[in-house]
Amino acid sequence: MESRIALSLRAKFIIPIIGIILLLGAVTTIFVHSTLTSTLTRELQERGTVISKNLAANSIDAILTDNVVELRRLIFDAKEAEKDIAYVYILDSKKDIIVHTFEDGFPKALLELHSSGDIRLLETEEGFIRSIATPVLDGKAGFVYVGISESSIREKIADITKTLFILTFIAIGAGILLAYFTVNLITKPIYVLTKGAEEIGKGNFDTRINISTEDEVAILADAFNKMIIELKKSMVRLIQSEKLASIGMLAAGVAHEINNPLTNILLSAESLLRKRTDENTLKQKLEEIISEVEHARIITRNLSEFSRQVEPEIKEMDIKEILERILGIIRIKNIRVERDIQSVILEGDPSQLQQVFLNIIINAVQAMPKGGRLSVSAGEANGFVEVSISDTGVGIPEESLGKIFDPFFTTKKVGEGTGLGLSICLGIVEKHEGEIKVNSKVGEGSTFTVRLPVDRYGKHSDS
C-alpha cells in the first residue's frame, strides 16, 4: 500500500490561501511592472521627442548663421533643465558635428547607430538610453539628437516592484493569521466532537459534547449527544440480554444444584416422620435441613442478583466477593474448580464486571464438554487487580485469536451464541480503563487475564 501524507484541516485551509495570495501577488506584480514600464517608457520617449523638436525649432537661426555659442547655450540649458537628458548633439546637413554636451569628447560610434528621424535604444555603461533624432528643416539645416536616460524610470519601477513584493508578503502574513483564526473557529468544535467520539469508543457513555456556537456544528453536537443517550440505553439493554442469555445457559446446572438440597431436605423430613428419634438425632436432622435450605437460598439469591437489571453505578467492591458469587452457582458435572482468589477492593460497576467474569467463565465451561479443570485466581499487582480464568478445554485456533473480541464473531455453532459476549466484555473492561489478554493453544485450553486499576478515581491516594 502506498504511503499517504495526511494534511491537517488547518494546513488544508492555510496552504491554498497562501497559494492564492502568492498567485495574485505574482500576477499583480507582473501586470503592474509591465504596465508601469510601458507607461513610463512611453512618457519618457514623448518627453524626449518634445525636447528634441523644441531644440530643433529653436536652433534654426543659430544653425543658419553658424552661431555656435547660441547652439551651445541651447543644448546645455536643455540638459540642465531636464535631469533625464544624458546628452544632446547637433549635426549639420552633412552629418558633421556642430555642438555636443559630451565632456570627454564626442563618441564617433553614435554617428553609425541610427539615421535621422528615428529612435534607438542604446545600452551604455550608465544604463539604457533612448536616442531621439529630429531633423531641422527636414534635414536641410541639420539634425538634433537627444539622449534620454531610462535610469530614473527603471529606479521607479524597481522601487514600485519592491513595494509590491513587500505588500504581497504582508498580505501573505495577514492571510495566514486570518486563515489560522478562521480555521480555529471551524476546527475547535470538530476537535471537541473528535474527543467525544474517542470517549464513546472507550465506552464512556456519560460524555456530553458542549458547543457554544449556533451553527451546523452545534446541530451536529446536539444530534451526537442524543445518539450517546440512545447508545447508552442500547448498551444497557444489550448487556442485560447477554446477562439473561448467560443465566439461561446456567439454568441446567442451577436446577441440579437446587434439586440436591431439596432432595436432602425431603429425605431428612421423611426420616423424621417414619422413625422415632432421640433429641440428638432430631437436632442433627434439623441442622441438615437448615443447611440445605440455606444452600438453596444462596443459589437462588445469586441467580436473582445476576438476572436483575440495575442502572450503571461506580462504587467500591471486593473482587473476591464478585468471583465467589459467580462460582457459587457454577456446578458443572466433570469440571473441577480450582480457586486462588485474594480480597482486593477496587472501584467500578459491580453489575457490569460480574457480567464480564460470568461470560468468560461460561465460555470456559462450554470449552470443556467432556469435563476438565477451571482455574480462577485474583490478586493485586502494581496498582492493578489481575483476574486469571483458565480452562483445559478445546482452545482457540490461532487464526481466530485476533477476532474473538469483534462483534458477532463466534466459534460456536449456530444458535449457541450471538458473538457479542466478548465484544461487550471488552467494552466494559476498557470503560473501566483496564485490558483483557488471551493466551490459548488448541487442545490444551485458554487463559483470559483481566487487568483493572484498583484506584481508578484516585480516592485512595495518600493525602
Image (spheres, rainbow, N blue to C red):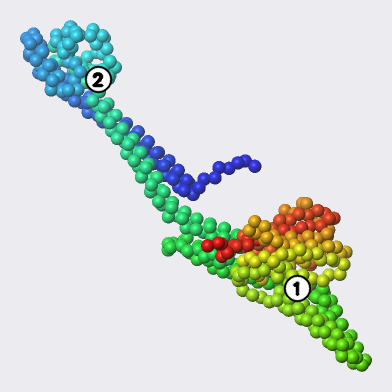
Instruction: Report the mark closest to the observer, 2 or 1.
Output: 1
Percent across and percent down for residue 433 are 62, 60
Q: Amino acid at mark 2?
A: Arg
Q: Assign a secondary structure to mark 2.
A: strand
**Residue 93 visible somewhere in the drawing:** no
373 or 76, nearer to the observer: 373
Above or below, comparing residue 391 to residue 157 in the picture = below
**Residue type at tag 1:** Ile
Give me the residue at 85% from left, 55% from top. 443
Circle nearer the N terminus (2, 1): 2
Height in image: 207 above or below 143?
Answer: below
Residue 426 in percent (x, y) is at 67, 61
Which residue appears at 63% of the width and 65% of the height? 346
Q: Tell me if residue 260 comes above or below residue 34 in the rendering.
A: below
Residue 363 circle label? none
Residue 25 spot, x, y in % from top left: 36, 38
Question: Residue 228 lies in what quarter of the image?
Answer: bottom right
- Observer-nearest residue: 447 or 282? 282
Q: Residue at x 77, y 72 (%)?
A: 328
The answer to whether the residues at label 2 and label 1 have Cβ atoms under 8 Å apart is: no
Instruction: Say which quadrant the N terminus sits in.
Output: top right
Q: Is residue 50 left or right of residue 248?
A: left
- Residue indicated by mark 2: 130
**Residue at horizontal 71%, vertical 56%?**
437
Which of the 4 quarters of the picture holds residue 453? bottom right
Kindly indicate the quadrant of the structure image that contains residue 444.
Answer: bottom right
x and y, in percent, of residue 201 in the image: 60, 59
Task: Look at mark 1 in the image and give the residue it sits on.
Answer: 247
